Image (spheres, helix red, strand yellow):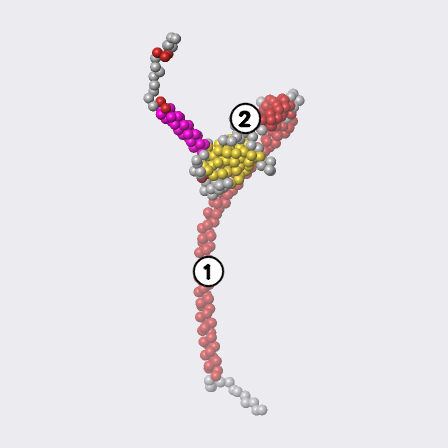
Amino acid sequence: MSESPLSSHSVPTIAHAQTKAVALLLLAGTLLVLFVLYVMQARGVFTENQQLLLVAENAEGVTVGSDLSFSGFPIGRVSRIELAEDGKAHIHLDIPVAQARWLRTSSIFTLERNVVGSAKLRAYSGLLDDPQLPDGARRDVLIGDAAAGVPELVATAHKLIDNLERLSNADSALSGTLANLQQFSASLNGKHGALGALLGNEKDVAKVIASLEQTRALLVDARASLQKLDASLVNMQAISSDLRPIVDDAKAISGNVRGASEDLDALRAEVDLNLRKVSGMVDELNRKWPFAREQKLELP
């Protein structure tokens, strides 16, 4: 019996092959565990989180793992979505404690749905001085759906087109207004310009022009009267200047008369005093003898 060709060559042996295989398995297992730990760390499994419950009319477009963004940066993640007993969607979020400082009691949460793309949860905190949002807080969500406004936008566009068609008709009010504007523009370029365009007929224009002429004539007469009045005022000023010296002389004479009156008063007082003295002397002489009057003795 002939030997097989393979039997003539011995199979090479690897030193410590079993140990190396075990080491390779351990290395692969370690790498797998590290990868899982990294993924868990990236998912926030080992991060201390704070819970937040958002209540929305519906959670359409929101999925587990969706981010809650603040100023364009993700600060939380949707962990669970459920339909509550009140018929509203309850969106549970995990917020890392390090990122929870951006959420305040006055913060507003919105769910924005775009025509293209997924829904986005956003947080807005206008007053960062307000108290921080507590753990397990519940907040309502304001929903802004851009797609929901598309039917209304289309209906509005149809209404606008219909209105434009009615306005562009030959018998529409806009057409009549444009015709009147054209007629008004032609009147402006006419003989009497804007006046003819406003009044519309030559008869009224002639009346207005006549009235304007009369007004102009009255203004001319009034101007002449004012000039005459100015001349009269100048003459009165000249007369007043001529009368001023006379008035000054009259004042001087009045002063002199006042002085003479004062002198007469003093003289009158002096005469009265002398008369009283003379009268006193006469009375004294009458009381003395032999000038005394006889006195009658009357008996009872």
Mark 2: which secondary structure? loop
Indicate yes or no whether the magenta region holds residue 200: no
Q: Is residue 128 visible?
A: yes
| Residue for point 46% across, 81% down | 284
- Left/right of residue 183 with respect to residue 109 in the rendered view: right
Look at mark 2 in the image and give the residue it sits on. 115
- Left/right of residue 27 with respect to residue 119 in the rendered view: left
Look at mark 1 in the image and give the residue it sits on. 257
- Which image quarter: residue 198? top right
- Magenta highlight range: 19-44
**Sequence order check, earlier mark of 2 and 1:** 2
Viewer-closest of 229 and 121: 121
Viewer-closest of 269 and 291: 269
Residue 176 in percent (x, y) is at: 64, 24
Residue 124 vertical position relative to residue 283 in the rendered view, above or below: above
Q: Nearer the viewer, mark 2 or mark 1?
A: 2
